[in-house]
């Protein structure tokens, strides 16, 4: 003001020369010298628009002397902002060594930006590490040696590349993702329930080994198309898509799935005689080993018991769906009772009894159709955990063996009339993948659309499966199969399961289910949870 207004000094002849002080010294009070100069330059330009502003730049990078590439990179970034953004006119530089901003390596540019503007606490340390590398490169070139490995540094936060689909408006999902390999699923083609028309050689080979006494046992379950009205909530097999119906059911109400078969069989045995003799029945009187405890066997030897439990869940419990009594009906699990050849029959009869029970109850109230869910249990062997503490690499079952046993189980369940398949009580995700692979193989061979449910088991309050996965990791492992419904089943009580269910619900892209039990046993071997406790959760 004095020079211009009182002395009448031409404002364009005034030159400001603020000090450019050293940055990157490791002293906190020096860290803002670069950005302070740029801000000061901008203030001078705003208040004295005609004056000139200059600065000697070499002081800025004095702490990195001896490595010209580092120094000139810092100068390049500094001058760019000081001149183009703040209005600096003159910078005293070594023109021969100058590096254009566009010629800087992207990671070097980020390091310089962080240092000049003091963007991060580690800006000086990061630049010192880069300086050490550049100095090592200089020495290597002098000695004609290979260049050292470049420090990785921190990943660059680059803008995400945009694609055409990024601008598409969001669209409400009306159903879970469907398997992309299955045209019937994509087109919602109703399952005709004419299983006798499935003639793939692998399916026929399994049927050829069937132990079902009746060689002409029925495997077709289609219904007359005019049996019930066409609109939801009615359902007719062969006319309507199970996938579409389940979607409508799950989006309109909380559907009910039955309870446990094992506990119901135990309750039955408390009121009625159910000992070794009853397990054997008339057909297995002379069996070579004890079979008591083989609950799946009761589908053959005591069908009235199993069908009675099915009907109790349907009529008293009001279940929309019931799982088959086939939790252990695989050749692997049946090896404990020397009943491997009966795997197909166990699944066929288990599903057939459920089919009969569902049809009888549905006939009484067609507005509430009941569905058979074919249960594929985990087997008593694991694909990813060693059975020997001395040999972590040991396995007592292979992937292919698990796939084969699951495929045979699936054929039996479908021939028995199931509507849905569920891979349940998963404690080892590799076993589940084997079952899912077998399901996909069967659907590919048959061309059918049979919805897949998957249910995992968290073994304790860590929220992990026995093979060590969290619920979210478990879902990520089986997400590729496009299950229609995913959830958690019995291991913990309702109170302990609630937070894990909530976490899983945040990541799944399909429907979600949960069925908890009465918690872990107390010190007396009893259970503290009640139905009321479970309902509150």
Image (tube, grey):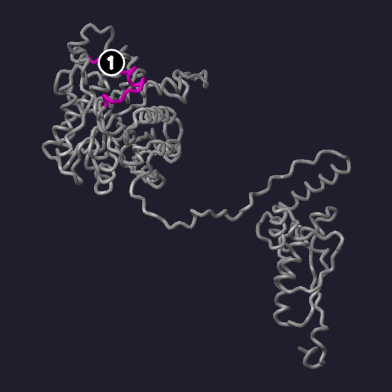
Instruction: State which quarter of the image contains the N terminus.
Output: bottom right
Please say if 371 is above or below 262: below
Instruction: Examine the rendering and report whether any part of residue 37 can be seen.
Output: no
Look at 71% across and 82% down and name the residue there: 47
Q: In the visual, does 85 lie left or right of 157?
A: right
Residue at 17% in and 41% down:
368
Residue 441 or residue 313, whichever sits in front = 441
x and y percentages locating residue 322 in the rendered image: 23, 33
- Location of residue 194 in the rendering, given as x and y in whole percent from the top left corner: 25, 28
Q: Is residue 25 left or right of residue 395?
A: right
**Quarter of the view holding residue 121:** bottom right
Foreground residue among 78 and 274: 78
Secondary structure beneath dot 1 equals loop
- 201 is within the stretch colored magenta: yes
Q: Magenta includes 137? A: no
Provide the major secondary structure of the magenta segment.
helix
In the picture, measured across the screen, residue 284 lies left or right of residue 482, that is left
Q: Is residue 443 above or below residue 537?
A: above
Question: 480 or 195: nearer the eye?
Answer: 195
Quadrant into which the C terminus falls: top left
What residue is pinned by disc 1?
A: 210
Percent across and percent down for residue 29 are 72, 63
When asked about the image quadrant of residue 424, the answer is top left
* Residue stretch in magenta: 195-212
Mark 1 surroundings: few (<14), some (14-19) or many (≥20) residues within 10 A: some
Q: Is residue 467 left or right of residue 111?
A: left
Residue at point 28%, 15% (across, down): 210
Task: Note whether residue 170 is visible.
Answer: yes
Question: Where is residue 201 shown, x and y percent of the image?
Answer: 36, 20
């Amino acid at each position: 003001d004095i020079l211009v207004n009182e002395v009448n000094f031409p404002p364009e002849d005034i030159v400001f020369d603020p000090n450019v002080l050293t940055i990157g010294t490791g002293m906190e009070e020096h860290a803002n010298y670069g950005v302070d100069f740029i801000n000061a330059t901008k203030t001078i330009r705003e208040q004295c628009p005609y004056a000139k502003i200059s600065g000697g730049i070499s002081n800025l990078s004095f702490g990195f002397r001896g490595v010209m590439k580092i120094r000139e990179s810092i100068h390049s970034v500094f001058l760019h902002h000081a001149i183009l953004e703040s209005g600096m006119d003159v910078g005293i530089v070594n023109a021969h060594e100058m590096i254009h901003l566009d010629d800087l390596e992207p990671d070097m540019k980020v390091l310089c930006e962080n240092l000049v503007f003091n963007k991060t606490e580690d800006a000086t340390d990061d630049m010192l590490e880069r300086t050490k590398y550049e100095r090592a490169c200089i020495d290597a070139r002098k000695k004609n040696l290979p260049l050292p490995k470049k420090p990785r540094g921190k990943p660059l936060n680059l803008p995400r590349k945009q694609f055409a689909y990024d601008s598409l408006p969001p669209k409400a999902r009306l159903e879970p993702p469907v398997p992309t390999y299955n045209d019937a699923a994509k087109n919602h083609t109703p399952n005709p329930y004419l299983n006798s028309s499935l003639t793939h050689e692998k399916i026929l080979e399994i049927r050829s080994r069937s132990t079902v006494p009746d060689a002409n046992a029925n495997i077709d379950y289609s219904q007359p198309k005019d049996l019930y009205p066409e609109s939801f909530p009615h359902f007719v097999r062969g006319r309507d898509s199970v996938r579409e119906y389940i979607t409508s059911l799950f989006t309109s109400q909380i559907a009910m799935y039955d309870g446990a078969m094992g506990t119901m069989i135990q309750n039955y045995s408390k009121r009625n005689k159910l000992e070794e003799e009853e397990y054997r029945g008339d057909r297995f009187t002379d069996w070579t080993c004890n079979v008591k405890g083989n609950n799946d066997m009761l589908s053959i030897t005591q069908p009235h018991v199993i069908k009675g439990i099915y009907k109790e869940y349907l009529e008293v419990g009001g279940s929309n769906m019931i799982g088959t009594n086939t939790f252990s009906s695989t050749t692997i699990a049946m090896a404990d009772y020397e009943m491997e050849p009966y795997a197909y029959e166990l699944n066929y009869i288990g599903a057939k009894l459920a089919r009969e029970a569902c049809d009888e109850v549905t006939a009484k109230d067609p507005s509430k159709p009941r569905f058979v869910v074919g249960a594929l249990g985990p087997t008593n062997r694991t694909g990813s955990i060693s059975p020997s503490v001395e040999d972590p690499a040991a396995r007592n079952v292979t992937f292919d063996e698990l796939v084969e046993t699951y495929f045979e189980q699936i054929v039996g369940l479908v021939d028995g009339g199931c509507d849905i398949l569920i891979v349940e009580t998963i404690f080892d995700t590799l076993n589940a993948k084997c079952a899912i692979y077998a399901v996909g193989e069967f659907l590919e061979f048959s061309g059918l659309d049979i919805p897949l449910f998957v249910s995992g088991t968290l073994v304790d309050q860590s929220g992990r499966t026995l093979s060590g996965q969290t619920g979210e990791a478990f879902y990520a492992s089986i997400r590729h199969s496009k299950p229609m419904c995913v959830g958690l089943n019995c291991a913990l009580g309702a109170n302990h399961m609630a937070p894990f269910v909530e976490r899983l619900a945040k990541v799944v892209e399909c429907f979600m289910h949960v069925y908890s039990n009465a918690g872990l046993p107390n010190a007396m071997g009893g259970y503290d949870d009640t139905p009321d406790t479970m309902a509150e959760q």
